Every structure is written in structure tokens, then in C-alpha cells.
Image (tube, rainbow, N blue to C red):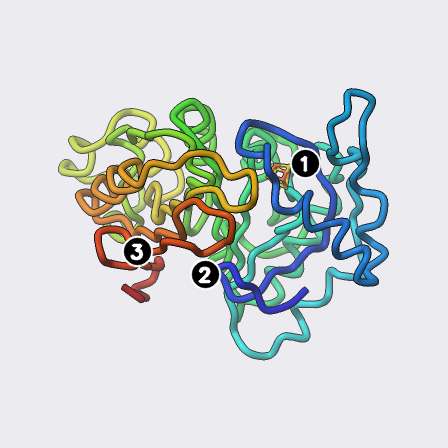
Amino acid sequence: MSDSSIQWTDKVWNPVVGCTVKSAGCQNCYAQALAPRLAAMGQPVYEGLKKRHNDGSVNWTGEVRCLPERLSIPLGWRKPARVFVNSMSDLFHESVPDAFIAAVFQTMADTPRHTYQILTKRPERMRAFLDEEEGLGCVAEFTGYPYPLPNVWLGVSTEDQATADERIPLLLQTPAAVRFLSCEPLLGPIAFHNDWLVPTMMVSGMRGEPSLAFSEAITEVGKAVAKKYGVGLIDWVITGGESGPHHRPFDPQWARDIRDQCVAAGVCFFHKQGSGPRPGMNEDLDGRLWRQFPGGSHDA
Ligand code: SF4
């Protein structure tokens, strides 16, 4: 629960630990590798989250632990920070009760000085939890704050075209102040549909019918989302190759193509790293770091 080495955030906050594999992007899960090390360093909440299975694989046990004692931690951080929620799990994992997710949102609502970044590979549950029309729950009901919360960014991990096609539409159907994609570990090229990359600033303040220009630029899904929530579509895209001893091949051209699509659409883009044995290697992309954050902060 501390300052983070992840370049696109300031701190990590882990009120949930433990997970299960969801897709190919999970194969060399950093959280799964880190959990036993944290346990060995004296953090018992991480003990027993990983084991050797009968087929010889070493993987999560499947246990997911919700830690109520960690819910209040961000209240103690006085300085505003970008906070990555659950780097050691997935907040929308099927084992996390609705009431606990709501408690996480309560903390975020109570600390508007922080910006929270929630990333999931389970956007179907995120949508179900946050879209009142799906009926599973609404943050406003639990917390008393109107939703979307302005300080909560929602994102999905998309490692290839198939996961992009599956997860991005679900993200777009979920109300959020800012939506983002983490294309890391990037395992193949991704071509975005032209109705996915319309930044919030292009439609900010819009309520009711989209403008004619906007209507012409996007398809029915995008229009429906913008009309319903008065917000834009994807605001930010992060790319990165896989790190670690078992890193898989990464072609920088995949990231360049995504960057070019973002630049053409006016969407913020952040390239985190190439692939290699250590995190953070080969950060440049055509001689530029390409680190842009929603809200106008540009490091590049
Ligand atoms: S969803 Fe995230 S935390 Fe869970 S196994 Fe996959 S990469 Fe790891």
C-alpha cells in the first residue's frame, strides 16, 4: 500500500488480494508472482494465495480476500494522488461481494482529492454493478453520492483484438468520468473501431442529443452512450510489452499503430515499456516517451 513504480500512477491501494486467470494476458501475471514474495517479506495477507496444482502449474489458489481494514487507507493520504485500485487482484472478480465493491466506492467518494484508476478484465460485472439499468447495484444508492464519481476512472485490459472487441463495448456501456484502456501486455495488433476513440473533451457538457458533427462521426453504440451519460468514449490508452523472465514477443509496431490511432482521434496515449526481463525497459517509441494523461498532463 504505497508509492508505485508503475509509471502511470502514484500509489497502489489493495483492499482486495488474490485472483484467478481470466485470459491470455494473465499468463505471466505480475500479481501472482509478487504475492509469495510479499508473504515472505512479512505480509501475511498474501500467504497461501498461490500453489502448485495437480497438472504441475503454479498458479493462484483461487482464494480472493477482501480486506476491510484497508478500506480507510486513502483517507490518511493528505496529498492528492493518482491511485491504482487493486494491483494485486481484480475489483470486479466474481468472488468480491457487491457490498465490498460498494465500500470501495464509498472510500473513493469520500476522498475526492485523489484520482482512482480501476482496471478490470471483468467488464461485464463492472457494467452490471454500475449501470442502474442492469439492476445489480448503483453507487449512488450505496454511497449517497451522484454517479459517475468525477474522481474515478474505469478501464479494461485488452491484450489483443479479441479482448478489445469483447471488453471495450462493455466499458463503453458503463458510465464513467474517464474511461481508459491498458493494452499491456500487448500480444498482438489492435485496430480500434472509429466509435471507440472520442475523447470526453469533445463532448463535455453535452447533454441530450449529440451534435450533428458528433453524430456523423460515431456509430449507434457510441451515440447511445454519449446520449445517455453525456460523456465521451475512450479518453486514454496505455500500451506496453510484457516484462519478466517469460516475457512473450512484442512488436513495437503494434504500439505505434495504437499511438497513431490515438493521435488521429485526439486521445491521450501513454507507452509504458517494451518487452524484456525487467519492467520499464525500452520505454521510448520512435525517440519519444509518449506519456500523456487525461486532464492535460503531458510528460512527453
Ligand atoms: S485479472 Fe489481473 S490480477 Fe487477475 S490473474 Fe489476470 S492479470 Fe492477474
> Which type of secondary structure does the marked residue at label 2 adopt?
loop
Q: How far apart are marks 1 and 2 (CA)?
A: 25 Å
Q: Which amino acid does label 3 sit on?
A: Asp
Instruction: Answer left or right for 225 relative to 211.
Output: right
Question: Which one is in front, 22 or 77?
Answer: 22
Q: Residue at x 81, y 32 (%)?
A: 52
Question: Which one is in front, 96 or 281?
Answer: 281
Are the two marked residues, 1 and 2, in contact with CB atoms closer than 8 angstroms? Answer: no
Q: In which quarter of the image is ligand 1?
A: top right
Q: Which of marks 1 and 3 is in front?
A: 3
Q: Name the residue under label 1.
A: 93
Q: Can you say which quadrant of the picture contains the C terminus?
A: bottom left
Quadrant location of residue 250?
top left
Q: Which residue is drawn at 52% across and 54% down?
A: 117
Question: Which one is in front, 138 or 16?
Answer: 16
Q: How far apart are marks 1 and 3 (CA)?
A: 33 Å
Q: Name the residue under label 3.
A: 284
Residue 298: percent from left, percent from top: 29, 65
Q: Which residue is drawn at 40% across and 42% down?
A: 229
Residue 231: percent from left, percent from top: 35, 46
